[in-house]
Amino acid sequence: MIQDMIAIVRDYWLLLLIGQYPNGPLGGLANTLILSALSIALAFPASILFALARLSKSPLLRWPVTALVYFTRGVPLLMLILWSYFLVPLLTGADVPSFVTMLTTLVVYQSAFLSEVVRAGIVALGPGQMDAARALGHGYIGAMRYIILPQALYNMIPSILSTFVSTIKDTTLGYVINVPDLTFAASQVNNQLLTQPFQVFLILAIVYFAICWTLTYFANRLERRITRRRAGLLNVPAALVTPSKIVSEQL
Amino acid sequence: MSGFDLSAILGNPEYATMLLHGIEMTFIIYAGSWSLAMALAIMLLAIRLSPFRFGDPLVAAYVSYHRNVPTLVQLMLWYFGIFTLMPNGVATWLASHNAEAIFAVIGLGLCQAAYFSEDLRSGVRSVGPGQMEAARALGHGYVSAMRFVIMPQGVRNALPPLINHSVSLFKNSSLAVVIGASELTHAVKEIENLSFRTFEIYLIGTVLYLFFSLVIMSIGAYLSMRADPARSARA
């Protein structure tokens, strides 16, 4: 059993790692990681804008984004993927690779989820920070840019890492629209071997576990550090306590 | 293909039957996996709370595996992997009894149990140690203190995450389509293949999922209100 698994890894490691590349599109684990990283990188700025819109006083900004967040939370990701699969080519009028379709879906989905995290982070700071920043003469944008967001985003780092983990897990759903990722590569291996599905899918599970567990572990450690720093229990130079303090010293 | 026309699907008895069957199957999978998950979660919590320490690493490993491996991969491992390793008699019986749905229930249930048990655990942990001391001082034994003092408060604390995870379990039931269970997403895809009315059928499917998710959220909100009116009024 274990020998079978070692043999599979020995024979197919390259396919699992990068897919058909360079004879075909990049795939495998590399594609999974690129897809996850790109979706977080794009979803992150969008989520900040969404959060600010949801906290804004103007209903014109607040309502559409609130509707989007509720919609995204109420509908399975699989359903959103099927929507994009059908809508994105229709809107762009071109043949879109499944990678792009999946990326679009993940960005929309994760930015809706992350925006809730950002919003919670901003609300958790309390109104005093904003009041103080305004009293010091900052405008709304200046206060957000220099006082509120640096603190809120710093406290959010663990949540962003966890979102990264769930994005990696979500990329597996690209399987239904044939995104050439790690899951796709594993099912290709399975189709070639035919006789050892358990071994192949166990390898797949182990690889995902190794990556996600490592990231979760770091997220938890960071979270503890940040909680301790906020509570003032960690003995660190004052300038390093929060990014906002560094900023205020520069000012 | 002409313009937007919902009646092309809803007015067609064949498609309507497929949709209803899909909804029914989604609910069977949801109810089955929810019950399995909750039963397992309570067992995992009992092991964690028991004074015997040797079960703890096992529970931690269980939770860690199910939280760090994508649910889809867990389902694939069950259906494409473990299913093939089962003895012939069991496999034949399963195959003739809707194996897809059974493995969807098993896979989703085992996975969700990890989340439920963590929710319950953090709910119980947030009950202060004074509660247990006070209960013991009033003459309750350990079991009775747990039953009447700690657990009611713990479950109440755990309600909000439990509700969120119940909604995500409902949404995750759509993953069963990948192992071939004939639930709602499956029905939507089938009808799309037959009718070519992509926009309409996706819209119907999406609205159905959204509607049932909102129903589950509302039931959850109602339960939270019943459990703790003061806190709900503040929120």
Image: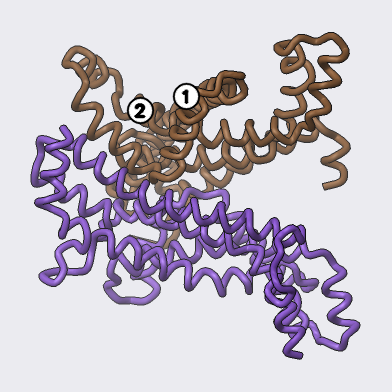
Chain colours: A purple, B brown
Locate residue A86 relative to residue B28 in the image: left or right. Answer: left
* Vertical arrangement, residue A215 with respect to residue A190, above or below: below
Q: Indicate the quadrant where residue A50 lies.
A: bottom right
Give x and y (percent) for residue A29. Answer: 28, 59
Q: Residue extending furthest right?
A: A135
* Vertical arrangement, residue A187 with respect to residue B62, above or below: below
Q: Are marks 2 and 1 in contact (CB under 8 Å)?
A: yes
* Vertical arrangement, residue A209 with respect to residue A70, above or below: above
What residue appears at the point 13 percent right and 53 percent down from the top-left corner? Answer: A12
- The amino acid on which the numbered mark 1 sits, given as a three-letter code, is Gly
Question: Residue B101, labelled with which disc?
Answer: 2
Mark yes or no: residue A86 visible.
no
- The amino acid on which the numbered mark 2 sits, given as a three-letter code, is Ala
Query: Quadrant where the N terminus of chain B lies?
Result: bottom left
Per the image, the residue denoted by label 1 is B32
Which residue occupies the foreground of this view, A32 or B127?
B127
Whichever of labels 2 and 1 marks the residue nearer the N terminus, that label is 1
Which residue occupies the foreground of this view, A215 or A81?
A215
Disc 2 versus disc 1: distance between alpha carbons?
10 Å
What residue appears at the point 13 percent right and 37 percent down from the top-left corner? Answer: A3
What residue appears at the point 73 percent right and 66 percent down from the top-left corner? Answer: A122
Locate residue B230 relative to residue B44 in the image: left or right. Answer: right
Q: Residues within 10 Å of mark 1 (few under 14, many from 20)?
A: some
